[in-house]
Image (cartoon, helix red, strand yellow):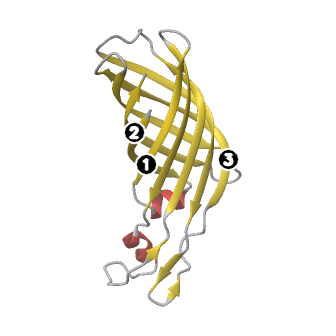
Amino acid sequence: MLLVGVTFPLNPETLHDFWKIGKNVGAGISYPMNDQLGLQVLANYSTHKIDQEALLGIFGLGGSNVMLTGGDANILTVTAGFKVYPQPPTSGLAVYGIAGIGFIKLSTKNLSGPSGPVAGPQTLDTTALGPGVGMGFDLMLGERFSIFVESQYFMGLNEGESTQHVPVRFGLTFQ
């Protein structure tokens, strides 16, 4: 499966407050165990731009012409889990649930202003294991091809504030 979408940053608080909704891309492999249950391995990469207005606002520079560069936040999530269909999928629309456990890596890049490096929100660099749960919809377009939309909540169980984000993904599945 191939997928693209958007990711909503939730936690740590600085990620939520100072980074915008991001873009994500990914790929995965599913193995059907029967008509209603399958195993799924998924890799998803999200990148988030810094919210310049929010950051400059804490320094009293909101609305100024100061331009910041860098500071992107990146989240890599690799998960393994289950995909469960309450009803066996047919040639139409099918609803499913997804649950698993995975590895979540959050990091931010250096932030610079007109005079060089900027001391903004703390640098984020965490790696953790954690659960992910969500749901989605498949639409079969042929015997071996479908499109889907799904959303999944992830929580990295690291020390301090957990890393939490919600990717919403659109994709293609080839069977």
Kindly identify the amino acid type of the residue bearing the numbered disc 3.
Ala
Q: In the picture shown, does residue 87 fall above or below 142?
A: above
Kindly identify the amino acid type of the residue bearing the numbered disc 1.
Asn
Could you tell me which secondary element the residue under label 2 belongs to?
A: strand
* Residue 174 as seen in the image, left or right of residue 71: left
Residue under circle 1?
24
Q: Position of residue 171 (x, y in %)?
A: 37, 35
3D distance between C-alphas at marks 3 and 2: 22 Å
Q: In the picture shown, does residue 61 fall above or below 144?
A: below
Outermost residue toward the bottom?
115
3D distance between C-alphas at marks 3 and 1: 19 Å
3D distance between C-alphas at marks 1 and 2: 8 Å
Residue under circle 3?
128
Mark 2 crowd level (few <14, some 14–19, many ≥20, 10 Å Cα):
many
Q: Are marks 3 and 2 in contact (CB under 8 Å)?
A: no
> Which disc is residue 169 wearing?
2
Kindly report which numbered mark, 3 or 1, lies closer to the viewer in this rendering: 1
Q: Are marks 1 and 2 in contact (CB under 8 Å)?
A: yes
Give the residue drawn at x 34%, y 10%: 90
Sequence order check: which comes first, mark 3 or mark 2?
Answer: 3
Mark 1 crowd level (few <14, some 14–19, many ≥20, 10 Å Cα):
many
Give the residue drawn at x 56%, y 55%: 12
Q: Position of residue 34 (x, y in %)?
A: 52, 9
Give the residue drawn at x 39%, y 82%: 61
Q: In this rendered view, identify the residue nearer to me: 111 or 145.
A: 145
